[in-house]
Image: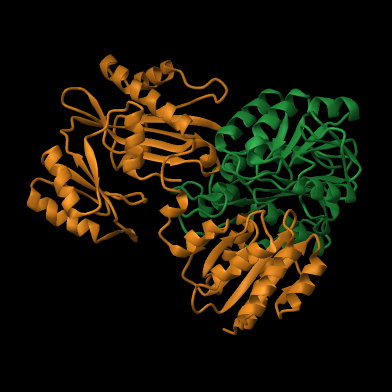
Amino acid sequence: MRLHEYEALDIFEQNRIPVPRRGLAGTMHEALQIAGEIGYPVMLKAQVLVGGRGLAGGIKTASSPDELKEIADTLLTSEIKGLPVRKILVCEKVEIAKELYVGITVDSYSGKPVIVVSTEGGVLIEQTAKTSPEKIAAIHIDPSFGYYPYQARSLLRMLGLKQQLVTAWSDVIGQLFNIALRYEALIAEINPLVVLPNGGLLAIDAVLEVDDSALSRIRLPLPDRVDRIENPLERRGMEIGVTYVDLDGDIGLISSGAGLGMASMDIIGEKMKPANFLETGGGITADQLYRCMELIMMKPDLKAIFINVYGGINPIHEGAKGVVRYIKEHNVKIPIVAKALGNRQEETWEIFRSAGVHVVTEAATEKAVERLYELVGK
Amino acid sequence: MSILIDDSTRVIVQGITGRIGSAQTQWMLAYGTKVVGGVTPGKGGATVEGVPVFDSVAEVVKETGANASVFFVPAASVLDAFLETIDAGIKLIVVVPEHIPVKDVLKMRSYAIEKGVFALGPTTPGILAPGKGKMGIMPASLFAPGRVGIISRSGTLSYEFAGILSENNVGQSTVVGMGADPVVLRNLADILELFEEDEGTDAVIVVGEVGGEQEEKAAGFISRRMSKPVAAYIAGRYSPQGKRMGHAGAIVRGSSGTVAGKHEALSSAGVEVLESPIHVARWAKKYKLR
């Protein structure tokens, strides 16, 4: 779950990372009040859960109340990369001597947390990594032994920094690592970490993405991840325990397993367009597939539905009962093709056929999609 | 021949008294797997599908000579059970459950490698050696004995590839699910190495997906070390960038881990890249695999 910048900054502050004075505003008047308390100029930052916000016009400076009114009004009625701006963060604007970068993530291949630092922070950090790799340094942390402060110090010395900056910066790295550990972060990042004219450091941005699988034990005092999803269909998917991604085609898809779902999309995409991606995971029941049918049918103008499931851990015969119940209750007329193989497959086929579902019994998804294509009649 | 499991594999099921654990024990037994015991702390003395249940892994190893374990333990308890299993001396562990916190997986992986334990998962369907046995949830009807190895990141896609091969009278030596999580307990190259050394395997299929670096890193291993033909399919060509597709392993992050990048890395390592799963039949025919 990705946290908003204002949520991450609060957590950073509680963990003794220096952050700017700031306040969260939902209206122009709130923004005006906060700016009055902080003093001009201020930064106005749209709080949307998407990367590249600054380049998309979501971060502005206001030097006067009049300027703030105009910017706040514009931001609060705009969208950034398709997401509505509901809140803006009003921050003190500081003088910047230098911009640094520090990020912590999990290196999935080595199976270790990795700390990445750079003396060239800012929006072009990824470009810097390619063009000036000597300005980037990284160190892997052994998950059994954990982090020790000397690791940050030696990392920073690799960049050829003076001791004063090494001391201050390694403190921030240590705190950020503690946050990453405590909140089970997949990403904890400060970009930029600003060096002030007086030599002090300030985290003027904060990125924190926590592991969804750990949410129940981290117990964040924050809104649930369901409330962070703007798309109502995708939100409904999470509520019923499936992964749903809204797409712009007209073929509804239900699959068991993300890999099979992606392969189904690839194959459908050759000649038709999927309306959604839906992956059930290992929790199929009759009720779950009934709700999946309900969810994919919320999209208007579906031309057909493709159900692609395997009975390994999933009781597909139960799933078929849920689909059939939905078809009968709602008198579904569009063609439905089902490929369902594995444990209790024959029983599953019979249930599907009882409601007029076209059952394909070959393993290759391509065969089922061919059948789908014939039925859609393009 | 097969890799990882054979006639000498004596399996225990951890979490055997749960709904999924007991149902899958039944399927594993029906396939001829030697399931010698189960573990659920506090349920020792019970039996499930005729299999004796013990309170600890150390006890079941001592009583039954078990040498492999498959997990159907709730995600929150997996780390604890995993460390217990390693300390009890088991050298092959299959972790089926999904939604295990990454922090736990990092510890599991580090300890398993330190102790020389071969572990698969999390979020894996397990291993199946056709005609010999299976550890995990793979549905037996799709598999047939033969000489092609399959390694898959996705569970259900491993069934799909085995199913297509079986329909074309091409059997499999062993089918291995490496796990669909971003961090897995063993990397792809380690499993490829086992197939390269296995006398019962003539060729290997890698079923990958968008995201991560497993396929790119394995390409290096393949060009250096593999003498057997390798084919690969990468799912996710039309997956929207940056959107989460089910398990976290399939996140597209920036330009690394793209389908095109993986295709390129694999092709230059001499791997035959399959544009669509059904093409695996043509590839098997070309190499006269069976």
Percent across and percent down for residue B172 are 81, 52
Residue nearer the viewer, A207 or A12: A12
- The quarter of the rendered structure image containing the C terminus of chain A is bottom right
Q: Name the residue rendered at 61%, 40% in the picture.
A: B100
Residue nearer the viewer, A368 or B139: B139
Residue nearer the viewer, B129 or A86: A86
Q: Is residue B38 above or below residue A33?
A: above
Q: Is residue B123 above or below residue A307?
A: above
Image hue for chain B: green
Residue nearer the viewer, A371 or A199: A199
**Which quadrant would residue A80 be assigned to in this image?**
bottom left
Percent across and percent down for residue B147 are 82, 50
Can residue A269 be spotted in the picture?
A: no
| Left or right relative to B229: residue A331 | left
| Left or right relative to B139: residue A281 | left
| Left or right relative to B82: residue A145 | left
**Which quadrant would residue B53 be assigned to in this image?**
top right
Can residue B108 be spotted in the picture?
A: yes
Percent across and percent down for residue B267 are 59, 51
Image hue for chain A: orange
Residue placed furthest toward the front: B42
**Which quadrant would residue A253 be assigned to in this image?**
bottom right
